[in-house]
Image: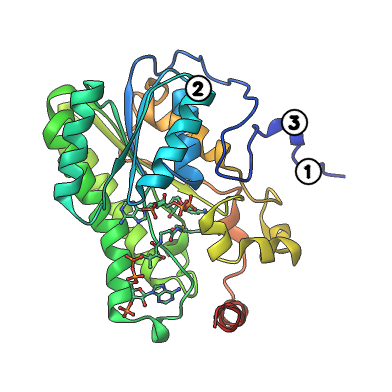
Amino acid sequence: MAQPQRVGDLPEDVDTDDCMTSYTHIYSPDLLKDQVAFITGGGSGIGLRIAEILMRHGCDTVIASRNQDKLREAANKLTAATGRRCLPLCIDVRQPETIGAAVDDTLKELGRIDILINNAAGNFLCPATSLSFNAFKTVMEIDTMGTFNTSKVVYEKWLKDHGGSIVNISATLGYRGQGLQVHAGSAKAANDAMTKHLAVEWGPSGVRVNTLAPGPISGTEGFRRLGGPRGETSGAFQSIPLQRAGNKTEMAHSVLFLASRASSYVTGAILVADGGSWLTSANDVSMLLGHWSSEMKRNK
Ligand code: HXC
Ligand code: NAP
């Protein structure tokens, strides 16, 4: 009989926005020695674990999003766990001037930017008929405009003259038209195209541009908002080829591959890290509508 994936094959993770108490390196701990990474949305969830893993490979980081207190707390945890520098900077990816100021501060304090991770995003379940025009626009502005704004600012202020690597965090929502996700699916599909356009235009400056598309990742806001824990208890993960949700460290390892010289000849690529989920999982609008309306009632 087939054996499920062994637990020992999975990297360590914790479900909260804390750093890990133990970590086993897969790559050389010096892989990113003395590099600097700028990570949008690096104060929570997948972005925080990406910051931790890059720092555990010798990198200093900037974590940038809207809530200064949350960022400061995360930066303290990251520095305590890794011994590397982490600068918490307030930005709204919809406002290019806030990104410009943060990039200037980064260059003043840390002297360089080798890696940009476009991870900031906003999402919620909502059927198209209930989605206001402003709600659709808001998600497009955070996910798509935010990725373009940050890429353009970091490229023009540093990467164009020094080279480097950009990794965009996407999703598989648009591949099969996921129900109740027209806003986020459309935004991430635009980002997947942007990855290819910018890889073509910026390759000659020594800038690689790639995308990671995660599946359902436990211990994250995205997972909670899209009904992940509920899916877990109702056995929905049995329809995923690897029979489980992913963890944040697994996403960070994929980002480490794309951001580092481990992938030196890879650009314009989309790496799907979802346990095979999008190929086989249900896309059941009635079930999603049921979940959405019970959440709406609970939040009233
Ligand atoms: C319907 C909603 C809504 C909801 C907000 N809106 N929440 N509509 N259902 N649950 C509407 C509002 O009514 C408003 O429209 C418009 O969206 C803007 O809302 P604001 O609250 O003013 O926007 P803002 O303060 O900018 O906040 C953005 C946000 C928020 C996206 C709405 O949820 C946020 O800040 N999210 C960041 C964290 C996050 O979402 N993490 C999960 C990422 S996971 P009106 O018309 O009333 O003005 C992810 C997973 C992908 O991306 C795939 C997983 C498998
Ligand atoms: P999360 O913790 O909510 O991460 C989103 C981050 O973006 C937050 O730190 C948030 O911080 C920041 N952010 C939101 N709006 C911003 C804005 N306008 N300007 C600057 N920063 C902003 O959720 P997550 O689940 O870890 O998601 C991380 C990434 O993975 C997202 O790109 C998401 O689409 C992708 N993803 C997640 C899953 C999953 O299962 N979790 C699956 C597929 C893809 P503030 O609110 O403090 O600003």
Instruction: Tell me the crowding category of disc 3: few under 14, some 14 to 19, or many 20 or more residues within 10 angstroms, Cα based.
Output: few
Kindly report the distance in space between the C-alpha atoms of the residues bearing marks 2 and 3: 23 Å
Q: Mark 3 or mark 1: which is in front?
A: 3
Residue located 33% across and 20% down the image? 35
In depth, the one of 190 and 86 nearer the eye is 86
Query: Residue tagged by mark 1?
Result: 4
In depth, the one of 286 and 13 nearer the eye is 13
Q: Ligand 1 shows up in which quadrant of the image?
A: bottom left
* Left or right: 288, with 44 as reference point: right
Q: What is the quadrant of the C terminus in the image?
A: bottom right
Kindly report the distance in space between the C-alpha atoms of the residues bearing marks 3 and 1: 11 Å
Query: Residue tagged by mark 3?
Result: 8
**Mark 2 residue element:** helix
Query: Residue tagged by mark 2?
Result: 82
Q: Give how far across and how far down residue 164 sits, in percent.
A: 26, 27
Give the amino acid type for the residue marked by disc 2 in the picture: Thr
* Left or right: 230, with 285 as reference point: right
Give the amino acid type for the residue marked by disc 1 in the picture: Pro
Label whose residue precedes the other's in the sequence (2 or 1): 1
**Mark 3 residue element:** helix
Residue located 35% across and 46% down the image? 68
Mark 1 C-beta closer than 8 Å to ligand 2 = no
Q: Give how far across and how far down residue 273 sits, in percent.
A: 53, 44
Give the amino acid type for the residue marked by disc 3 in the picture: Gly
Label whose residue precedes the other's in the sequence (2 or 3): 3
| Marker count (numbered) | 3
Q: Give how far across and how far down residue 293 sits, in percent.
A: 57, 83
Q: What is the quadrant of the N terminus in the image?
A: top right
**Mark 1 residue element:** loop
